[in-house]
Amino acid sequence: MPIKYRLIKVGFKPILFFVILGSAQLGAQINTETYRQENLKKGIHFSAGGDIGYVEGNSSIFQNGSTGWLDYIQDWGYIFAVTNYQIKMKDKKLFLNKGFSHLRVVKSGKEPRSIELFLQQEFNEFIQLESRSLAGLGLRINWNPKQSQATETSKVLVFSGFGLMVEREIIDSGPDGNLGDPVHGDKIILLRSTNYLVLNWNPTPAIKILTTTYYQPDVKRWVDYRILNRVTLKIDLTKRLSATLNFNMRYDSEPPGTIKHLDIDINNGFSYNFK
């Protein structure tokens, strides 16, 4: 049961923060492949983590985040749920407030395919998103021979997914009412295609590199699309303690109002596996 912490040095004692899983609450689809775990044993698996940091000086900065995820594995398939919340403040002014939840049911089919049904909810004040709700159905393909996953740690494992989802958004249009979606306004219902590619590489038993990329266009207007990418580097320091480095990129071809097309986020942390 891995518990994740992140340390932030602030000129005095670092702070450790632990947050347990909240209720399952999640742009187009959040990059949840990062939280999916392969080759788990039958039963329930639960993980949770969080970070907290505070800097005081010329400016005061506070940030806090928490994540929890759960896997329920059975012979017929599995259920996967993840929830995340992040908040950041500078000089007591809120400049980041976002959260998501995602629930996915995966029905094992004829190898290497499986069917996925998913639901999610998200809000993100940083990009003027009051609410995004979606429901979707897709196909996941495991491109790896079954025996290679257990015997060849240096092999790159490849997974892909294809599907459709109904997406409903409510956007904060601002006091002048002109900051909504440039095409649809402040209330949007779309049918999007959701497609992803996952590459999982273990160059050594102690190092894991995972990259996931989503491409999600509006099926009626292909010029309206989002690309999400996340790269995670995990290094095992001991049998249970690991260091992590995450790179996140989000591109929206038609962002609301004055929001920029591209967002990039880099963070690092530690995880401890109790199981």
Image: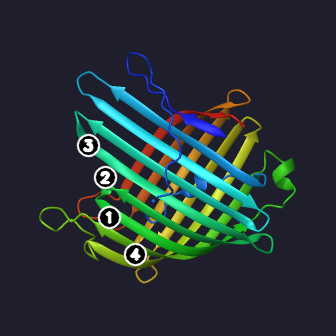
Q: Are marks 2 and 3 in contact (CB under 8 Å)?
A: no
Q: The C terminus appears in which quarter of the rendering?
A: top right
Taking 36 as reference, is 242 above or below it? above
Q: Are marks 1 and 2 in contact (CB under 8 Å)?
A: no
| Residue 237 location (% of width, % of height) | 68, 27
Instruction: List the residue tagged with mark 3.
Output: 94
Q: Please tell me whether mark 1 sits on a helix, a strand or a loop.
A: loop
Amino acid at dot 3: Leu
Residue 158, by quadrant, is bottom right
Instruction: List the residue tagged with mark 4.
Output: 223
Q: Return the residue nearer the eye: 109 or 21.
A: 21
| Residue 152 location (% of width, % of height) | 84, 48
Instruction: List the residue tagged with mark 1.
Output: 255
In the drawing, does residue 107 fall left or right of residue 263?
A: right
Q: Please tell me whether mark 2 sits on a helix, a strand or a loop.
A: helix
Q: Nearer the viewer, mark 2 or mark 4?
A: 2
Q: Nearer the viewer, mark 3 or mark 1?
A: 3
Amino acid at dot 1: Pro
Q: Residues within 10 Å of mark 4 (few under 14, many from 20)?
A: few
Residue at mark 3 to residue at mark 1: CA–CA distance = 21 Å
Q: The N terminus appears in which quarter of the rendering?
A: top right
Q: How many marks?
A: 4
